[in-house]
Amino acid sequence: MIALNIHKMLKAEGGTMDLHINTAIHPGELVALYGPSGAGKTSTLRMLAGLMDPDSGTISNDDTPWFDATRKINLNPGKRKIGYVFQDYALFPNMSVRQNLQFAQKKRGNSQLISTLLDMVELTDLQDHKPATLSGGQKQRVALARALAQEPEILLLDEPLTALDPKMRLKLQEYLIRVHREFQLTTLLVTHSISEISRLANKVLVLEKGKVAREGIPSEVLLKHNVSGKFKFVGEVISLEAADLMYVVHVLVQEQPIRVIATAEEARGLKPGDQVIVASKAFNPLIYKLEA
Amino acid sequence: MIDWGPIYLTLKLALATTFVLLLVGIPLGFWLSRTRGWWKPIVETLVSMPLVLPPTVIGFYFLIAFGPENFLGSWIDKWLGIKLVFSFPGLVLASVLYSLPFMVQPIHSGLAGLPPSLLEASKLMGKSSWTTLIKVGLPNIKPSLLTGIILAFAHTVGEFGVVLMIGGSIPDKTRVASIAIYEEVEALNYGAAHTYSLLLLALAFAVLLSVYLINGGYLKRFWR
């Protein structure tokens, strides 16, 4: 179990922000860090990894102290057994895909693991290519495979899917699910996307202005009221149109725009960009198989 | 037939200086790119001083510091058996100081320009700073390295004031091409001065051209 209780004064837009995180992460959990920009998500991840020092507090993993300000303990990042996927991927441009993975290995020689990982992220054909020749999604997969090549106990992902187009994002979520199922790594994921959280995470920490505002199971934390419908999808409002007494709300659900009729009361307070739940209670759905 | 001694000596001095500068400039540039202490601006200033200081000033202080009558100079002579004034090792040391910014600055800015995440990723893999520098830092700043090497080399070839102050003009020991030209002109041997000058001109052109060709990617198509 990772226990962290950390303080750090951060320079933020319009002054300073007191980041204070006190939480515990259990082995094998996939925890999402969610919150607006500048809430301290990335800083939390960096302090956990040892790339940034907290001003005070403690971080420990099981019985090993990683950081303790009063006892002057600060374990080297390389000894924390962390696989880290950076927002900009941080692939080494001078090395091929395979060499990137090889460099990440603690001890040389387990080329079997590297081949397995390359296979898993479907990059075996591109293993001799340099990162500069890869697409965003491919780079992302290399970064993920490289983090796993370190044989870490903990996987930290800093907005790994933000820079990708929607289709690629869905595909990479599959990879993340597969990785988590296969390696059972304790995973922390920084994300802006509610749909990503509801697909991937089994726990979510909502950060606001440097504090944990809410935490718990994603569906309970992120949905203000629990909807007991047959259908519920998380989506994003694209536009609102007044039509007679009702409103037509266009909502993007899993990259598919849909139309929802809302009363004036329901539509009040909604604006494009809002995250919403679309739920249906009374209708019987029709199912058609899609030809692959 | 001209005396090739000065040309040979110039190239030897430039090569030796560049080699020493690489050994000094890489750790120094790396350190500058990472440190944030209050002393960093002071070190940066010291490294850049030769850019603005007249070469004669460097030569003068070098002469004072390492002269045999001085403590430092006599100590080095006694314990290491090296005379640093009016000798080739002295020229190399002075040239290293004189061309220091030309090696350190490209390496420093090259390393500082790398995305910090590259070095952090390597750190998280448990690599030492040294391994990170050799395997990740330097291979990704090849253009900066090349610029540093070429500029340091070319700048040493073009040295005059420092060499004159501390080396004088001892044939085959300290009489480099730039000094030979000066002396040939003084002796009204315009022919010899022309030859040396033209050789240096061609060398400077070729060296700089190669930098632009390589860094501009013009040669890439021949390498693939």
Image (cartoon, coloured by chain):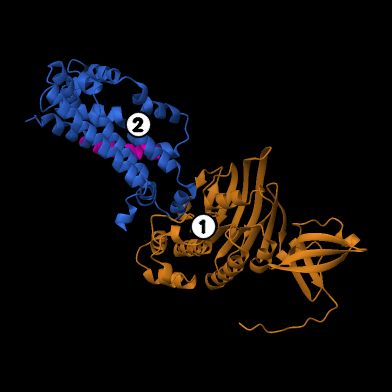
Q: Which residue is mark 2?
A: B101
Check disc 1 and give the amino acid type: Tyr
- Segment colored magenta: B16-31
**The N terminus of chain A - image quarter:** bottom right
**Residue A185 to residue A80: above or below:** below
* Numbered disc 2: secondary structure: helix
Q: Which chain is blue?
A: B
What's the residue type where badge 2 is placed? Pro
Question: Which quadrant of the view contains residue B180?
Answer: top left
* Relative horizontal placement of residue B12, taking residue B154 as reference (left or right): left
Residue at image position (39%, 59%) is A103
User: Main structural element of the magenta stretch: helix, strand or loop?
Assistant: helix
Q: Is residue A105 magenta?
A: no
The residue labelled by disc 1 is: A84
Residue at image x 12%, y 24%? B191
| Quadrant in the rendering for residue A105 | bottom left
Side (left or right) of B51 relative to B94: right
Q: Position of residue B96 (x, y in %)?
A: 27, 30
